[in-house]
Amino acid sequence: MAQFELLLPKMGESVAEATIVKWLKQPGDTIKEDEAVVEIATDKVDSEVPSPVAGVLVSQLYQHNDVAQINSVIAIIRTEGEDKEEKKVEEVFNNPPVIKDLPGADVMIPNNSGSFKTSEQKSPAPKQGIRFYSPLVRSIATEEGLSQQELDGIEGTGAEGRVTKQDVLEFVKSKKSGQSSSAKAEVNQTNAITEGPTTFQEYQYPIERSVSKEHQPMITIGPGDEIIEMDRMRRLISEHMVMSKEVSVHVTSFVEADVTNLVKWRDRIKSSFEKREGQKITFTPVFIQAVAKAIKDFPLINVSVDGTRIIKKRDINIGMAAALPSGNLIVPVIKNADQLNLVGLTRAVNDLAQRARSNKLQPDEVKDGTFTITNIGPFGNIMGTPMINQPQVAILAVGSIQKKPAVLETEHGDVIAIRHKMYLSMSYDHRVVDGALGGRFLKRVADYLETWDVNEEI
């Protein structure tokens, strides 16, 4: 008999860990090849982990709500045959595997295709203040009334210096006996504020950043106020947005577009299109097509930043922000959007949006985006200042289309007419995208929409 180590698979370039949601197989259960073993959840998407081998589940190395790192061993499966590198369960616990895709382990460097690969050179250990805490550890800390300052001051004995349940309990015990040292926590807290990620690699993963109490606003909870605990996805979105503001210099440009021809075209073809294709056509596929064309005209919008290096992406992968019933957001990605026609884009948009709302997206469908579009028009908003979706450098918000009086130049002179107008708002990273490039790109998107052929057939 041999034993197989089931690893938590890589779920995307910005995902470092996943939460164990539900074990679908229990110790002693028989597992078929490619059969799902466990349900997991990340900040990007919920998914199942299948077994690449057939066998019997020996042990679960993580429990419900535990957080596992990418590439770590989560289960042991007994298989038929001989395995020269067979490991006992006790060895896995005592010698946890090295995580090679995390800050503090191997450095992620771009290869010639623009994607990232792992180097063999070790990077320095993670800076203080950038630590991961499992839901169990945070729960204990909350119950015991530990401040973030105290939590950051605890020495972790787990893998990669992680704080374990036992570490927290021992700290609480020593604190109650008057033996805890606040000085060390104070030092760590100072480091958490003054030190931070300096390269793109350090920003690839969800981070937890400490803020001293003097920098936190004073919150007064009054009678009748309701306290709502953030769910897992909202906490990760919050961290991702704070990180985006810290890593990028946000600038937003605006342009107004006359999309009268586009509106007339859609009104003309939408019924026949739905009857022929079995799909409703919205404006979103048209927006995506216009952005893809503009990226080809201005490819330096389609980049990422790695320290002092600009990584120019070959593929044009457009993410579209989708609101979930829970109130959270997710960004499914249309890969190689420039290679799809309007019918293909419409099918992709409708399919991804529907499966996003029903929580059925696959991990590959929410990664590798190079530019993001968020449609704020359905909420009655005319413009916005969207947050850049790291590690991208630009995001476009499309507002609602409204009828407005406008001055038109004709051969007989200027006239006032009713036109369909909309605002396009684009936030971009001023470290690498200057106002000239950002403004010209945004205007080019508007030009593609304004010059839409009302007689075009698809």
Image: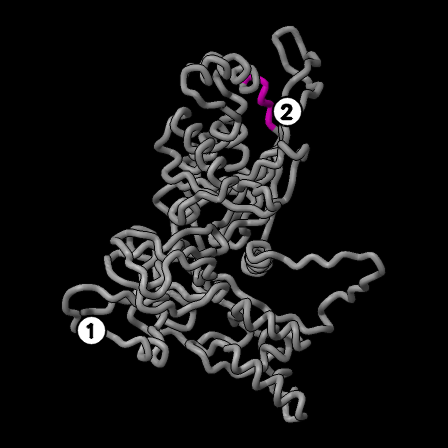
Residue where numbered disc 1 is placed = 85
> At which x and y percent is residue 87?
25, 75
Nearest-to-viewer mark from 1 and 2? 1
- Quadrant housing the N terminus: bottom left
Q: Position of residue 27 (x, y in %)?
A: 35, 65
The label number, if any, that marks residue 421 in the structure image: 2
Type of amino acid under label 2: Lys
| Quarter of the figure with residue 415 | top right
Q: Secondary structure at mark 2?
A: strand
Q: Residue at x 75, y 65 (%)?
A: 217
- The total number of labels drawn is 2
SS under mark 1: loop
Q: Specify whether 276 is left or right of 152.
A: left
Which residue is at a point 35% across and 32% down the rendered structure image?
Answer: 339
Q: Residues within 10 Å of mark 1 (few under 14, many from 20)?
A: few
Membership of 259 in magenta stretch: yes
In primary-sequence order, the first of circles 1 and 2 is 1
Q: In the depicted view, which residue is nearer to us: 181 or 247?
A: 181
Q: Are marks 1 and 2 in contact (CB under 8 Å)?
A: no
Question: Can the viewer see residue 412 in this picture?
Answer: yes
Numbered tag placed on residue 379 in the rendering: none
Q: Amino acid at mark 1?
A: Glu
Q: Is residue 300 magenta?
A: no
- Where residue 252 sits: x, y (%)? 61, 44
The residue stretch that appears in magenta:
257-261
Foreground residue, 179 or 29? 29
The C terminus sits in image quarter: top left
**Which residue is drawn at the image coordinates 46% and 13% (left, top)?**
272
Between marks 1 and 2, how big is the CA–CA gap?
66 Å
